[in-house]
Amino acid sequence: MTNPLFDDVIDRHGTHCAKWDSMEALYGVPASDGIAMWVADMDFRPPACVQKAVEDMAAHGVYGYYGDESDYKSAIQWWMQNRHGWTIDSDWIFTTHGLVNGTGMCLDAFTKEGDGIVLTTPVYHAFARTIKAAGRAVVECELALTDGRYEMDFDAWDAQMTGAETMFILCSPHNPGGRVWTRDELQGVANFCKRHDLILVSDEIHHDLVFSGHTHTPMAQFRDITDRLIMMTATTKTFNIAGTHSGNVIIEDPKLRARFASRMMGLGISANSFGLSMATAAYSPEGAQWVDDLVAYIDENRMLFDEAINAIAGVTSMPLEATYLAWVDFSNTGMSRKEFTDRVQKTAHIAPNHGPTFGAGGGGYLRFNLATPRSVVKEACDRLTDAFSDLQ
């Protein structure tokens, strides 16, 4: 399926774009012909309603403090109810400077230095970085790899707990493996957190990017863990507006909410007016149609990429159920990590994320961003096929 919204190749070089302008310095992939497939933002413009919100602000020309968040919060409520079957109260919503900041705020509000923070690895690399910077200890509970997909291993994780752990950070849907956790798996997470008395932070930033045949279940639907649950969502991943650094921490329990509100107040955190305006516009029927078109487009990119990658001997792309991030296993090529990474970066001139940054279990992998025009995905597939042609 072609789509003019997503087929247009937009030159992002020289725009202070981390994904493209930092590629050569970080990965040695030349800017002249390299393909940036690392940072998890998209090479697409957001829906027209979001662009109009920015243009209206610019036309007004006065950029003062944002007041009256009722429309913004109503848009969030509408989206969560209509897209996810989740009813929330406006008083539960806190706006942070993105969800990495939201993670840091949760660590600050609900844990203390030295506490163990449980991650199910391999998982989004910023979690561990933030935990370590906050003086907490990362507890890596490795996901089981069963028939080429990740599964929870609660028996093994139970055996790892020492009593020093106070928080579990869940990535749902999972990044980088692309799993949409089932209701049974999520109930297992809830039970695990109750058994070990853990605060549960559920980062659901990819919840809108789910492929046909799979259904995301908000952790908040499990009513037996409301007293220990922190939900995190954002428009930024869904609508490609990550530069607004705007995210939501949504807390139903009044005691937890009061603790979080106190830390927000103590640190003087308030929202960016551009982020609020763009999010309000995005969470709308027009935004919903754009997301449906986006997911269908990325799904075709996924199928194209997987067909090419899985045809390379010893290389396997994990089947994606959600996200636009392909998790590719090179461990059966017989190559060292340096050798297969060099082939991708130095021969194919593609910059991916390195698997070890995602924690235990990531050593043989690279992560590729497929949220880019199809012509770019096709070019990347051709380059990777050529770079590993001797394995055919």
Image (tube, grey):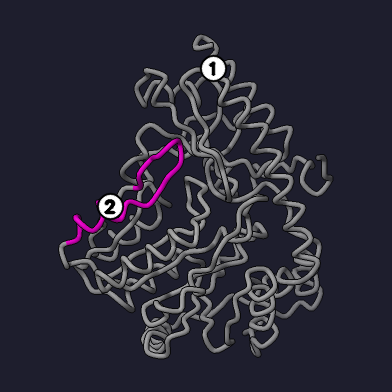
Kindly identify which numbered label has been placed on residue 387.
Answer: 1
Q: Which residue is pictured at 55% across the width and 65% down the height?
A: 217
Assess whether residue 163 is covered by the magenta stretch: no
The stretch of residues the image draws in magenta is 143-161
Q: Which three-letter amino acid code belongs to the residue tagged 2?
A: Glu
Count residues near mark 1 (Cα–Cα under 10 Å), then give few for <14, some for 14-19, many for 20+.
many
**Residue 148 covered by magenta stretch:** yes
Identify which residue is drawn at 42% across, 45% down: 150
> Residue placed at 55% from the left, 30% from the top?
350
Is 345 placed above or below 106 here?
above
Residue 117, labelled with which disc? none
Q: What amino acid type should be assigned to the residue bearing mark 1?
A: Ala
Q: Is residue 93 left or right of residue 354?
A: right
Left or right of 360 on screen, residue 221: right
From mark 2 to mark 1, how far is it between C-alphas? 34 Å
Q: Find disc 2 in the rendering and name its residue.
A: 140
Give the quarter of the figure containing the N terminus: top right
**Quadrant showing the C terminus:** top right
